Amino acid sequence: MAAKIIDGKALAARIRGELAVEAKKLHERGYQPGLAVVLVGEDPGSQIYVRNKTKALAEAGYRCFDHHLPATTSETQLLDLVRTLCADRAVDGVLVQVPLPPHIDSKCILLSIDPAKDVDGFHPENLGRLLIGEPRFIACTPYGIMKLIEEAGTPVRGASAVVVGRSNIVGKPVAVLLTAADATVTICHSKTKDLPGVIGTADILVAAIGRAEMIRGAWIKPGATVIDVGMNRLPSGKLVGDVEFAAAVERAGAITPVPGGVGPMTIAMLLANTLESARRRADGQP
Ligand code: GUN
């Protein structure tokens, strides 16, 4: 039987609608949630991401502080802007779109963001807090993945979960979240021996490797929940995930499509983190 398709677009729209209601209540108390979005240079992919983020912010009734800087901006100028935004009481979150131009040290910029306004959840302090089970901001993609698993109705406690990919912003944090939710988690990567064998044990599979359709449908455990984080453009122009969807959909119990799965959830969770930050400001917390 074909898998249930987990509709990330519909779920994200629902969450964004709920957040808009909450944002309005906060605004009525005098605290309109506000996010500063900083884009340096003209990378076309980043421009699309930023446009989608600013549109979603406006639709949910948030303030958006949009800063588009030229590619020639120096690291010092960018650091100055980030510091100014972090000190601004009207700004609840500061997001610097990556990748940055090569003459700017991204790590240095990331570290300069106040962890209390790091709604991306990329700052080492926020990643560390997640690791010790006291999260402040959960990085948006892993946060969205957990919501998609919940939406699929998949029990996590005691489940065998396999995460393919070990990046600091997806693979590692999602493994921590699944562990905190009582799954037994295996992290796989390019040096894993017998990847098909390990994947075959997964009740929950999270694919975040960035290689088009590398995970074959035949490797998937029948009935598994499959979350595909991949966004790969084929030479034909078609957008595909890290999982061979056409075959996987015949074996899995539930699966996210690409596009329309994880992607839309990332923006919804960015709005969730920004609202959370605004609530803390409204409640007088640092
Ligand atoms: N570039 C691609 N995705 C993201 C994201 O979620 N946050 C930031 N800051 N940059 C990105």
Image (cartoon, helix red, strand yellow):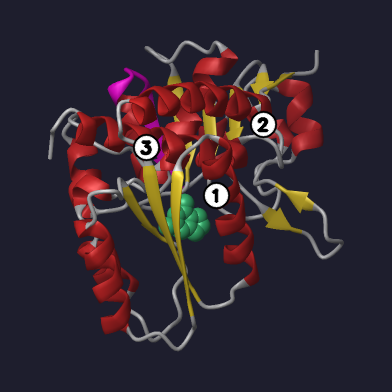
Please tell me whether mark 1 sits on a helix, a strand or a loop: helix
Amino acid on which the number 3 mark rests in the picture: Gln
Q: Which of labels 1 and 2 is toward the front?
A: 1
Q: In the image, is residue 186 part of the stretch drawn in magenta?
A: yes
Q: What span is in magenta? A: 180-192
Foreground residue, 67 or 253?
67
- Res 57 seen here: yes
The quarter in which the N terminus is drawn is top right
231 sits left or right of 207 in the view: right
Q: Earlier in the sequence, mark 3 or mark 2?
A: 2
Picture layout, residue 185 above or below residue 155: below
Determine which of the numbered discs, if any, sits on residue 53 in the image. 1
Determine which of the numbered discs, if any, sits on residue 9 in the image. 2
| Residue 11 position within the rendered picture, expressed as x and y whole percent measured from the top left | 61, 24
Mark 3 neighbour density, 10 Å: few (under 14) some (14–19) many (20 or more): many
Give the Cα separation between the discs numbered 1 and 2: 14 Å
The residue positioned 33% from the left and 37% from the top of the image is: 138
Please tell me whether mark 3 sits on a helix, a strand or a loop: loop
